[in-house]
Each structure stands twice: as C-alpha cells, then as structure tokens.
Image (cartoon, rainbow, N blue to C red):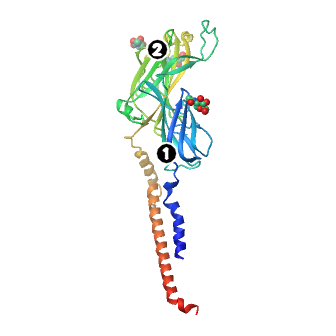
Amino acid sequence: MRLTWFGALAALCPVLLCVDGVKNQVIDVETKCDQNVVNVTIHLEKEFNGVVHVKGSNCIAAIGDKGETSIQIQLDARKCFLRVFKEQGTLWYSGSLHVQMSEAVLQATDPMVPIKCALGTDMLSIKTAFKRSGRKMGGKAEEEHLGKAWLEVRGSAVSSLTPTNALDVGEHTLLSVYTSLPDEVSAKPVDCKVEDGRGGVQSLTDENGCTTDAQLLPAFQAVGPGHWATAFPAFSFPDSQLVHYKCTLMICSGHCPEYNCSEGVNSTRNSRNFQDDTILDLVELYNSVEVTAPNIDFGYLRREAQKQTDDGEEGGWVCMSGPKVAMVFATLGALFLAAVFATLLLLIRHRRKYLKRYSYGLYT
Ligand SMILES: *[C@@H]1O[C@H](CO)[C@@H](O)[C@H](O)[C@H]1NC(C)=O
Ligand SMILES: *[C@@H]1O[C@H](CO)[C@@H](O)[C@H](O)[C@H]1NC(C)=O
Ligand SMILES: *[C@@H]1O[C@H](CO)[C@@H](O)[C@H](O)[C@H]1NC(C)=O
C-alpha cells in the first residue's frame, strides 16, 4: 500500500521537478549573408519542432525541415527590418530571433538569439532602373548598380559599445546618409520617415527634403561630398521599441534642385516642372534601431484606467494583479497538497496499527 503511493509520487516527480531535463537549448549559431539575404543556421541540442520569429517584425522567416537538430532560416534584410551598422570599417546586419520551441505556445525558457553578420563592404550598392537617355544605354531601362549608399542611425559613443546596439530615448543620435556615385550624377536625401512595422508612420522630412517637424528631426545638412547628417534626441513608438528609418535618395543628373524650405510651396522657384528631367530616380534607403525607454513610466495610463473603474460600481471587490493571483493560488494549492499528504500518512499509519493489532484475531 505504502509502496504504491511512493511509486505514484515518483512518477509525478519528473513532471513537477525535472522540467530542466527536457528543455531544448541553442548550441551554436552561424550566419552567412549578402546585401539582400541573411542565412542563419541554428544548432540545437534536441530536435526542433517550433517556430522562429524575427523580433520587431512579422516577416516570414523561411525554415528548413522540421524535426531536425539544426534549423536553416533565410531572412530578407529589408522585410525583416534588420539593423545595419558600421564596425571596424565594414557594415554588419544585426537582429534578434525569438526561437519558440513549441509550435503553439510561448514559454519562459524560449531563447532570444542575437544574430550578426559582416557584409564585408562599407556601403550598400544601389540599384536603379532609370533611363540614361541617348548615351550608353540607348534609352533602355535596365537595372544596374549605379553606386553605393547607406543610411546610418548612430547613438552617442556609450550606446555604440553596448552589445545590443540599442539607443535610449532622448539619447543624442546622428542620422547620416553616405553616398558614392559616378561624377555625372549627384544625390540628396528627401522624404524621410519612421515606421513601427505595424502600420504606424511618422513623417520626418517631405519630398523636397524640408523638415516636417523640426522638434523631431531638423533638416539634413550637407557636411561633405556625398555626406549629409542631422542630429536629434532619439525617440521611440509608445508600443514598439523598434524604429524603422526610411529615406528616399533623389538621384539627379548634374546637381539636384535646391529648395528653400523657408519659402512657401507656391514659389515659382520651387516648382517641380523644370526639374523632372534632372531627377533620374528615387531609391529607398533604410535602417532600423531598437530604442529603449527606461525612464518613461507608462504607469499613469494604468492609474487612469484604474481610477475610471474605481468610479464605477465596484463595491466589495478586491483587485489583484496577475502575479499576486498566481501566488495566492499557488499557496492555496500547496496547503491543500500538504493536507492531503498528512491525511494519507495518518490513514496509512492508522491502518497498519489496526492491522497489527487485529491480524491474529481476524481470520481465525
Ligand atoms: C542563402 O540560402 C539560399 C538557399 O539555400 C541560397 O540560395 C543563397 O545563396 C544563400 N545566400 C547566402 C548569402 O549564403
Ligand atoms: C529662403 O527664403 C526666405 C524667404 O523668402 C529668404 O529670407 C531666405 O534668404 C532664403 N534663403 C536662401 C538660402 O535663399
Ligand atoms: C498655394 O496655392 C493654392 C492655390 O493655387 C492656394 O490655395 C494656397 O493657399 C497657396 N499656398 C500658399 C502657402 O501660398
């Protein structure tokens, strides 16, 4: 009788206590990339049957066969909003993968895997499809690599040293555009905006390169040949820490038109008509950065919500947060289990005494 109970307890033990033994773990991560794609291979301790998400984006990470101990993932650098940053003279792609071990549910033990891949180049090549009328291409529209460019979002020296490469809200940040183009063409950044990846957009500069909100981002200043920059305090979206920057690079034959941003839009000099043939193409540049808001307390939102519910008819209810409710239930559960075991032990002892006392007299 007693042995049966211990057997049952022993069978329960692996479920209750030995969870660590079944946890799957990441052993190694390899990356290989070109400008468009980052191929990631994750090696795991056990077979993988889950899902991989890219943090801050809902891009589909293509996955190899399931039930293997290594996973192959192909990330589209642009669709997956990977960060581009410069270190030791070369550009790197970086991002975070959330490895969900179970196909259906999230677990506290699911790892976040940082990825980083060196591109081996100092700028990204830009593809254009414009017509070089008359000259070399004979008016044929064809994708060609025209030159190189990149959009940099860089915090102050302190945050550049942190392993996550993230910014803090309010941190002094430089937004720069670098280009390297053939002599006969020039460029300038226009129409910059930030997106939260879920449809939220905030415009920073308009199609002429004039600022739309000088408090958010002052207009770009030319600081050198093919190099523009502006500085601003880093900002974030209220419900998303990943901020995706996009700027359009206007590519012109000869010099790009200059706009006087303090003049009205109806000024004849700002008229678009005569520039249409100087603008060869518009190319999108992008980058992403994680901006954390450690000092911003969103508690007031919750307090407001609480005040509103308090005003309603809530007499007699005790409100508790999720973790507190869980703790109360855990305590009650533990007390209940202890009571059950105590009762069982007493019963068993009592029964043994009873059997001992009467075993001689019962069946004779
Ligand atoms: C990434 O993987 C795909 C498919 O396996 C392959 O075609 C491509 O060449 C790889 N790219 C790089 C940069 O390794
Ligand atoms: C831009 O326009 C304003 C108003 O018309 C004028 O005062 C200013 O001098 C102009 N700036 C340049 C650089 O032309
Ligand atoms: C520009 O012109 C339009 C009509 O042509 C007018 O309604 C508008 O007020 C003008 N804007 C400025 C800033 O002058």
Residue 207 seen anywhere in this rendered image of the structure: no
Mark with earlier residue (2, 1):
1
Q: Position of residue 69 (x, y in %)?
A: 57, 44
What's the mark number on residue 259? 2
Reading the image, the residue beneath label 1 is: 111
In the foreground, 63 or 261 = 63
Is 300 displayed left or right of 348 in the figure? left
Residues under labels 2 and 1: Cα distance? Answer: 50 Å
Query: What is the residue that sits farthest to the top in this orientation?
Result: 134
Mark 2 lies within 8 Å of ligand 2 (Cβ measured): no
What secondary structure is marked by label 2?
Answer: loop
Quadrant of the image occupied by residue 290: top left
Residue 87, placed above or below residue 239: above
- Amino acid marked by disc 1: Pro
Q: Position of residue 56 (x, y in %)?
A: 51, 38
Q: Position of residue 152 (x, y in %)?
A: 44, 25
- Amino acid marked by disc 2: Tyr
What's the mark number on residue 168? none
Report how many numbered discs are placed on residues in the image: 2
Residue at x 35%, y 30% (from the top left corner): 157
In the foreground, 28 or 258 = 28
Residue at x 48%, y 42% (from the top left corner): 112
What secondary structure is marked by label 1?
Answer: loop
Q: Position of residue 111 (x, y in %)?
A: 49, 45
CA neighbours of label 2 inside 10 A, class few (<14), some (14 to 19), many (20+): some
